[in-house]
Amino acid sequence: MTKVTRAFTFLKQAIKGEEMDYTTGSMNKAVVLLAIPMMLEMALESVFALVDLYFVGHLPNSSHAIQTVGLTESVLTIIYSVAIGMSMAATAVVARRVGEKDPMAAAKAGAQAILIAIGFNTIISILGFIYAREILLIMGASNETADQGTTFTRIMMGGSIVIMLLFLINGIFRGAGNAAIAMKSLWIANLANIVLCPILINGLGPIPAFGLTGAAIATTTGRSIGVIYQIYHLCNGKHLLRIRLSYFKPHFEQIKALLKIATPGIFQFIIASCSWIFLAQLVATTGGDAGSAGYQTALRLMMFFLLPAWGMSNAAATLVGQNLGAAKVDRAYQSVITTMKYNVTYMAGVMLFTFIAGPYVISFFTNDKQVQDVALQALYILCAGYIFYGVEMVLISTFNGAGDTWTPTWVNFFGFWVFQIPFAYLLAHYFNMGPTGVFIAIPVSETGIAIIAYILFKKGKWKTIKV
């Protein structure tokens, strides 16, 4: 079999989603089979924001629309943080139970995680719906932007339960080693969003044009369709995990165990999210509407490339969890090193592409020259740290996959709150660098986080965590 044929076979097997035992066999094959669908899944998650960005970026007075989408996404990162924290706990517990060859316990853990997420997110959705305009103003939006974007933000915040479930249920599938189902749910959700976005924004036949609001309706509807697909596969009994209705009866010991892992994990990502929110607000107040829109454009493009890397990093979480469950510590360690090599190679390629194609990509998403200039400067500065981002993501996923969620939480606290936020504020205000100072603070702090995370990884505390 030639290398090309073997690569094609691997790709086909990864996308098809054949279930296998990841605690034995070739490590390279295990990483590739998990990483391909996980990378595609995360790339597709980022497509939501890019599709919205493209269509609203071509509306009249697009700077207000782009700013609304960007600021709302920045606030939604809190929802993402809770969702990722819960999905991370679900991945860790499900992977550990699967490694122990106990799929029923894995399914029950998944059901309890869903129960927790629904209860928590209901409160956030209600508050976000009621205070949508106030949220935009707090984030630094002008009154005009807040007036135009309130309905968009209200729909996105009110429907955030589907964001929570999409992340969480995909985390359950990833823990079970079935990353292909997680990927396909995003395919379906994105296809619906891509079809609905231009129709609802610009109108078609008897369907009126909803403008910016149409983007929120399309995105929320697309994600809802993806969640329905997930639930079908969780319950149809054709996969390793099958969740039954009886599994949703509250099991307080299991809930306590999940929250023990999820709580620091949620704080871990909320710390990072609040830092991004502060930076977005700092750019909006020092750079105005054009500066904010340019930063949000660059950020969306950066996340488009970073999310696939995060997907590859999730392969490490699954492999570490399952191999620790099977008492194969050395194999768990090797899975991290192998995944890191792949991720660094990918991020180096993305950095090169960004330097070459940045101007062309940005001009595709917005016609505003001021916005384009800020976005290009931000993108060039942000991509300087891409290789370190790749290392950091794998190591953070390693700790989380092992159930050691406190280590990356403290790393994020010192890296983002103790260093990044004061450093960005200092450069933006005291050195009068404005948005440029904020852009510089991001790769500098991320590089420091990667170095600290690697030192802690080598110490090996993550190998001894009980889940």
Image (cartoon, rainbow, N blue to C red):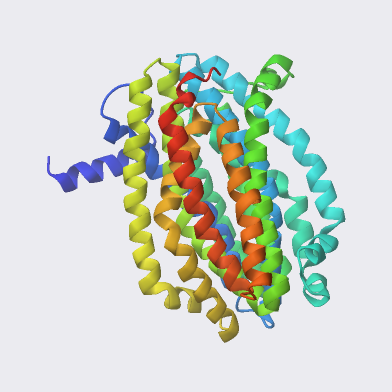
Which quarter of the rendered picture does the C terminus lie within? Answer: top right
Q: Is residue 38 visible?
A: no
Residue 183 left/right relative to 251: left
Residue 356 at x, y percent in the picture: 36, 73
Residue 63 left/right relative to 334: right
Question: Where 287 falls versus 190 (above or below)?
Answer: below
The answer to which quarter of the image holds residue 130 is bottom right
**Could you tell me which residue is drawn at 69 percent across and 17 percent down?**
246
**Could you tell me which residue is drawn at 50 percent across and 13 percent down?**
102
406 or 160: nearer the viewer: 406
Q: Number of marks in the image?
A: 0
Residue 5 left/right relative to 91: left
Q: Residue farthest to the left? A: 1
**Could you tell me which residue is drawn at 67 percent across and 39 percent down?**
267
**Could you tell me which residue is drawn at 55 percent across and 59 percent down?**
442
Question: Where 4 falls versus 133 (above or below)?
Answer: above
Q: Residue farthest to the bottom? A: 369
Q: Is residue 447 visible?
A: yes
Which quarter of the rendered picture does the N terminus lie within? Answer: top left
Residue 126 at x, y percent in the picture: 84, 47
Residue 213 left/right relative to 16: right
Residue 406 at x, y percent in the picture: 60, 31
Residue 236 at x, y percent in the picture: 55, 27
306 or 192: nearer the viewer: 306
